[in-house]
Amino acid sequence: MEQVEEEVQGPELSKEVKAALDTIKKEGHRASYVTIANQEYIYRGINRKEWREIVSKRNQRIVEAGEDQAMIAEIQEDEVELITSMCLLYPEFALESIGAGTVQHLADLVLFEAGFGGPDIQAVKV
């Protein structure tokens, strides 16, 4: 029985994304691509050093917050925004113009790319 290899077609990228991706790859990043709410994004996974720094700062702030649940929730939101801003390569991260759910979704994808997360999230390598 003969095996036939299928060629996997990647997503159709806009000219802007293709140009950004060329630059990103030249800078040595391993990038992934996703479209959320008709907006194209390129991101990278977070590395171990970055993750440890974020967790260290988060834990220190949570200790300082004590039992203040509102402050703890704000710390967690700040962490999501920080992860997204660090690892979003295209377009430029602008908190005031990005959807609230998009920030969380991108942070989840970044963490998944770094080895966190489960099988329900799948990134496209570009």
Image: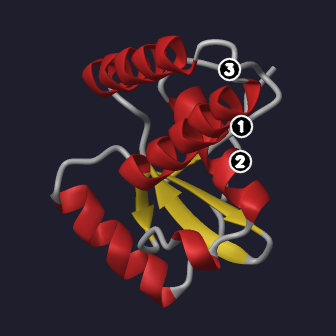
The residue type indicated by label 1 comes to: Gln
Which of 14 and 65 lies nearest the eye of the viewer?
65
The residue type indicated by label 3 comes to: Gly
- Disc tally is 3
Quadrant where the image shows the N terminus: top right
Q: Is residue 109 above or below residue 120?
A: below
The answer to whether 25 appears left or right of 62 in the picture is: left
Q: CA distance from mark 3 to mark 1?
A: 10 Å
Q: Residues within 10 Å of mark 2 (few under 14, many from 20)?
A: some
Q: Is residue 74 above or below residue 15?
A: above
In the rendering, at what x and y percent does residue 33 appear? 56, 57
The residue type indicated by label 2 comes to: His
- Answer yes or no: do the residues labelled 3 and 2 have beta carbons within 8 Å? no
The numbered disc on residue 105 is: 2
In the rendering, at what x and y percent does residue 76 appear? 62, 32
The numbered disc on residue 117 is: 3
The answer to whether any part of residue 7 appears in the image is: no
In the rendering, at what x and y percent does residue 92 appear? 41, 73
Give the mark, 3 or 2, whose residue is nearer the N terminus. 2
Secondary structure beneath label 1 = loop
Q: Looking at the image, which residue is at 47% across and 25% down?
A: 114
Q: Quadrant of residue 122?
A: top right
Give the farthest residue toward the bottom: 15
Coloring scheme used: secondary structure
Which of 125 and 39 lies nearest the eye of the viewer?
39
Q: Which residue is mark 1?
A: 122
Q: CA distance from mark 2 to mark 1?
A: 12 Å
The answer to whether any part of residue 43 appears in the image is: yes
The answer to whether 55 appears left or right of 68 in the picture is: left
Secondary structure beneath label 3 = loop
